[in-house]
Image: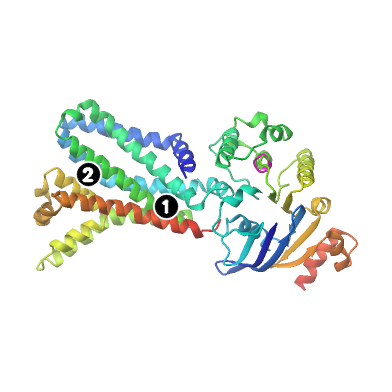
Amino acid sequence: MLKILKYSFFDLMRSRWSYVYFLFYLLLGVVLLFLNNDLSKAVITLMNVIIILVPLIGTIFGVMYYYNSREFTELLLAQPVKRSSIFLGQYLGVSFSLAMSLVIGLGIPFIFYGIFNSSAIWDFSLLLITGAFLTFIFTALAFVIALANENKIKGFGYAILLWLFMAVIYDGLFLMSLMYFENYPLDKFSLIATMLNPVDLSRVLILLKLDISALLGYTGAVFQKFFGTNFGLIISLAMLILWVLIPTGIIYRMAKTKDF
Amino acid sequence: MIEIEHLHKKFGSNQVLKGIDLEIEKGGIFAVLGPNGSGKTTLIKSILGMVIPDSGIIKLDGKKVKGQWKYRNEINYLPQIANFPGNLKVKELINMIKDLRSGTNAEDQHLIELFRLQPFLDKKLSNLSGGTKQKVNLVLTFMFDSPLIILDEPTTGLDPISHLRLKDLILTEKAKGKTILITSHIMSFVEEMADEIVFLLEGKIYFKGSINELKTKTQQPDFEHAIANILTTSDA
């Protein structure tokens, strides 16, 4: 598997898109720091961008890579390589290169700005960690979609829908249900509903770490009580890890039975 | 060498293989023939584990291949359509495959010279012509020393000289006592090379035996007519 990972990774590192993605984050970091002139504020702005953009790039890139590397996959399938390691290797190759573009692209401007001497270092690290998690989660979901659909157009369609649902529609449904059932105790429901969407989970995690939970309004107090503690942090990270592991497991299972 | 029992495979509602029983002995050239869509490539891909059969057993040297992958070290496979990752150079592709099959020796220099591929080594695969891609395909297939060689339409796109070289190459491998499985639609090529013929028709084995046996069975004087005879009588 490591060999496949290596080839996929270097293949992507040579492609133009990795650089575009890297340069985008580099530019974003520089501009935000230049405009805000304040690390904490830059981190907040950055969060809003990352929460929406990272899943989008992860899904699109994952689906695109899978369809584009079909030839490579077919070539590998005739070689003495385990089936599951081909797909897991490719998945990890895409995720690692995307996560690296994110972490290095944002890391460089913040390091030069002096993040190490600032109190925002933990907030910033958490931001990068959740960003990396989101990359792994959505790339895995994209691979699942691509494995399930031979048709490229369908695959892309479902991938976009998935992103739209997770990033936009889910929140809408969530808020609507909160309004609708406002006469009932909703703390548990809202906690669980947040846990079930990696995008929401990441957002809440970062917001609470930044101590701006007042922005959350209605359920903010419950969230602060839960996510603000170490226990909440561990549970949330465990949830994020589960969100990576479950789709990866599905990739593993699908890889075993697919025909080429 | 290869034993296949009751092999079934369905793609959607299309039943491609309908119970194949086949035994291929060690050594010699076996041609798998059949009209388009008769399941030749599916059969070959099932042996390689690229297509997972619905039911049936495939054994290689007495060992079941289902769920295994190490046995592919013993097989050299030439795919029907040379689909390569376009952004790699020829040299990089060859080195990559060598790296993936580490532990076995690769004889690529001799093959690169044989097919005159030196000028293309630093070119990207997406910029190569179909024939040149097929030559790269052949180099990748023949550079390892494996007891079983599977060639799916090996002559596609080759010029006459390369065609001759390919025939020599196959005969040298045969002389080493290897088992070679070929599918082809070029009957003269099959007639010249094959020791035995496996004829697939609608997902079943219609005939297995030598070319002479086929001629007597169909009562036709030459091989091409014998094949045509099978196809016309089966349609009727």
- Residue at 68% in and 58% down: B2
Q: State how far apart marks 2 and 1 are (Cα).
A: 25 Å
Front-most of residues B133 and A9: A9
- Residue A159 within the magenta-colored segment of the rendering: no
- Segment colored magenta: B138-142
Characterize the magenta stretch by its predominant secondary structure: helix
* Residue A229 position within the rendered picture, expressed as x and y whole percent measured from the top left: 13, 50
The chain letter for the residue carrying disc 2 is: A
Would residue B117 appear left or right of A109 to someone viewing this image? right
The coloring applied to the image is: rainbow
Label for residue A143? 1
Tell which circle, 2 or 1, labels the residue nearer the N-terminal end.
2
Specify the quadrant that holds the C terminus of chain B.
bottom right
* A241 versus B210 height, above or below: above
Q: Residues within 10 Å of mark 1 (few under 14, many from 20)?
A: many
**Res. A145 in view:** no
Circle 2 sits on which residue? A48
* Residue A74 position within the rendered picture, expressed as x and y whole percent measured from the top left: 56, 49
Residue type indicated by callout 1 = Phe
SS assignment at label 2: helix
